[in-house]
Every structure is written in structure tokens, then in C-alpha cells.
Image (cartoon, rainbow, N blue to C red):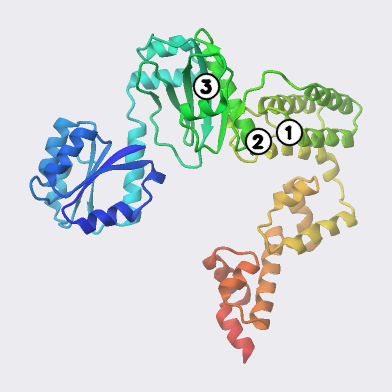
Amino acid sequence: MYQIVIADDEPWVLYRIRNLIDWNALGFEIVGTAVDGLSALEIVKEKRPALLLSDIRMPGLDGLKLVREVKVTSPDTIVILITGFSEFSYAQEAVRQGVFDYMVKPVRKKELSSVLERVREHLYEKNSPEESDLFFSLLGNEKQYSISDVFGCMGHSNLLPYFCMVTAAFEQKLSDSLICKSQGEHPNLCLRTGTRQKSILLQLEQPQCDMDFLIEKSDTVSALYTGISTIMPAATDFSVLLHQAETAMLTAALHKSSTPLFYAIKTPKIAHQLMTRFSTALRSNERNTLLAVLDKLEASANHLQIDTILDLTNRMIALLCEHHYGNYEALELHYKQHLGINNILDTLILPLRQAIQYQESTQTVPLTQFRKIMNVIEENYMQDLRLSDISKQFYLTPNYLSILIKKETGATFSELLIHKRISLAKKLLIETELPVQDIMEQVGYKDYSCFIRLFKKHVNCTPYIYRKEAAQ
């Protein structure tokens, strides 16, 4: 969290600003408030906050004088000035003194949130060039560093004998620096490895540690998903621990596991069995067996680590390309760093399934199967129904399914969905007294303006006028 101090001589303004937004969600923590400039300066001297938000007119020491003092006593503190006086001269003087931004009372929620986003982005990039160079070297494998090398680069050589990496993904964007070291005799090292992800290298006294201890020590209790590497000595390559922790975290995301996962060194036998079976079925052109292997891989995912699944799917892609099987031209190899924490299994397996299905899907779909497809649309059009959901259910590519629906019905999937939803809306407007808002939600829309616009486009009047005219 970035620390912030707020100063204003009007208590009600202080109260309003404190409660205007969710500061923690934006990565800020209010560590002090003041009702005059001298008190604000004392707090800044003590706390050295990342940000000072101050009124420009205050007793004791006004905002402009406060800025000059802050630049001397806490030069890294960013200052944003607030005033009820919008004369341009104040803004000019504030800018000359190096103020980050300038806002006019009353401060609006949207405006304040926008300014804080820019402050946070500025703070992200505030690392020294040396730290940034080290950060990108560690993540980009431009140079191999042992764990002791890494701490040496940070100016620390008094190390404990063992080390462990914890990688965690969070729901909110992080405000951590690119690279930072904790305080104390045996500091930990933290890398912000994503906008919502960080990796913490822990120093340990023993080769075995309790999971709860590691999570508490790394301050990742609030994470969505957490992965923990094996515990290694100082001579270990830093990238090994980073790889293990990220792999374990992505595995936790794959399994939707709120419990942190340790990296597993051994690969289950089923991985070798699936690959052998896939290769044999491909040589024999047994399409159903290929799909059955993917079904088995999907069913076994909760027992496999993400790097195992990644390796299997990439090897399967390579085999399909080698045998020119299915729609192999559309396949691309996947890399761990390109995977998000959502829909990992679909990202890896669905393209394979669609490529294998391609040869069949380019032929005419049986009438019975098309009726099943239309039944799915009929039963679910009031929900958040997507073409990709249906194509996955029937092992068809979304593109082919779109062409098929257009060919058989004369309308695109989107047009079909709109027609069914608007028809139901008209029926509910006439037969019920439900509010338009409720009808909109029942037929599958969440955006009020979108629903009104579509209704008017297809019925030539608004829902209110349609109901009124139908009642006459």
C-alpha cells in the first residue's frame, strides 16, 4: 500500500474525502490527516508518505508554502493540491513548484480516482535504473543468477541457509514496486511479476517449513491463488524457484484451489500414458480416440500440474501439425507466461478439440444434431449464451457453427438471439404488468440502454409505447 496524508482546514471536507472512495482498493492507505499546514508538515516529516493531498488555503502554513517545505524534508512525496479558488494563478504557481496535479472543490469521486490511478502508475515506474535492470534480468533470463547473486546485487550478503519462493495472484491491482527488499537483518525479496501478481523470495533457517508459516511470512494471506516452490540452498539458480512457484500458482488457479499449492517434482504416470495413446490414435486416424484422450486429460486435470498439461498439449499440437491432421494450421504453441488465471483448461484443450473435430465439422451436420443445437438456443437464449459455449458443447468450431446457423435459419446467431429475446419481451409487456427493467433482465439483457435501443430498432417504438398501444 502507498501511504497518503490528507490536509484540509475544514473537518467536513476531510471527512468527505476520506469516505469518497475505497482507498485500499486503489492501493493507498491513509496514515494521517491534518487541519492546518504545520500539522501536515509534521506528519509528512514523520511518515514520509508517497502522497500528500492538501488544501491550498490553510492556517499556519498554506498549501503553496507547504509544498516548498515538503520538497525539502520529504522530496519523494508527491503533492496534489485542492482548492475552492479556481483562479489560474494558483494553478500556475502550483505547477511551478512541481505539484503533481491540481483539483478544484468539491472533489468528485471520478476525478479523484483518475488522479490516483496516474499517481500509482507514476510510482510503479519510480524504481532506480539499477533495480529495474535487475528486475528485467531476473524475469527475462538474460543472465543466470544464483539466489546469493540476487541478494548480492541488492547489497546484502548475510544470508540464511535456505530459500523458498511464493508466487501469489490477487483480485485487485497491486501497488508494490517492481522490486523491493523488506527490512531487517535477513530481508525477503519481492518482485511484482504482474499487475495482480507478485513473487516473494523468503529466507529460511530450516529445509522444511509449515505452509501457514510461509504464507504469513510472505504476506499473501489475501491472495486468490498461491504457489510455493521447493526449499533450496543459496547456490540454486533463482529462475528455478521462480518457475516452480509460478507453476504451482497457475496449477492452483487451474484447480480453482483457494488453498496454496506446493510445486510437485514428480510427473504422474498418466501423462506418459495419455501421450502414448494420443500418438497411437493419430497414426491410426482414430478421431474418436483422439477426442477421448482429450476428455481423459480434462478429467485428470485436477491431478496434474500446469506445466505437465502445458507440455502434453504442446506435444499434441506438434503431432497434429506433423501429420497434417484436422485444422492444424490454426493451432499455436502455448507458453506459461501467456496464460492468465482464468479459463486455463479451455485455453489449452479447446483449440486441440476443435482442430480434431474440424474434418467432421466441414461436412454436413446431421439434422438431429442441428435440432439439438437449436434446442440449446431455445432453452437458454434468456441467459448469457455465447456461440463459443454451444460450439464447445457440440465439438464444432465457432466459425463453422455460425455459418451453419446462418445457412439453416437465414439469420446469424446474434440476429436469432435478438429476435427471440425481443419476441419474448413483447409477449411479457402485453401479458404481464412487470416493470420494463424486470422484463429486460428476464429476456437476457443487463444493459438498459442497449435493450431500449434494440427494442426500438426492431419494433419501431419503445417498450413503454408498445405496452400502452397494445392496451388500447
The C terminus sits in image quarter: bottom right
Q: Is residue 111 left or right of 375 when viewed as pictured?
A: left
Q: Is residue 298 left or right of 90 when viewed as pictured?
A: right
423 up-or-down from 124: above or below: below
Q: Image quadrant of residue 37?
A: top left
Write down the residue under mark 1.
Answer: 301
Q: Image quadrant of residue 291?
A: top right
Image position, residue 15 (x, y; %): 26, 55
Comes first in the chain, label 1 or label 3: 3
Measured Cα–Cα span from mark 2 to mark 1: 8 Å
Image position, residue 431 (x, y; %): 68, 82
Comes first in the chain, label 3 or label 2: 3
Residue at (48% x, 21% y) in the render: 201
Residue at (30% x, 57% y) in the render: 108
Q: Please name the amino acid that badge 3 sits on.
A: Met
Write down the residue under mark 2.
Answer: 254
Helix or strand or loop: what does disc 1 sit on? helix
Q: Nearer the viewer, residue 311 or 28?
A: 28
Measured Cα–Cα span from mark 1 to mark 3: 24 Å
Write down the residue under mark 3.
Answer: 165
Instruction: Give the residue at the far top of this rendering.
Output: 235
Q: Are marks 2 and 1 in contact (CB under 8 Å)?
A: yes
66 up-or-down from 180: above or below: below
Helix or strand or loop: what does disc 3 sit on? strand
Callout in the foreground (1, 3):
3
Instruction: Give the residue at the far left of this rendering.
Output: 60
Helix or strand or loop: what does disc 2 sit on? helix
Residue at (62% x, 76% y) in the render: 459
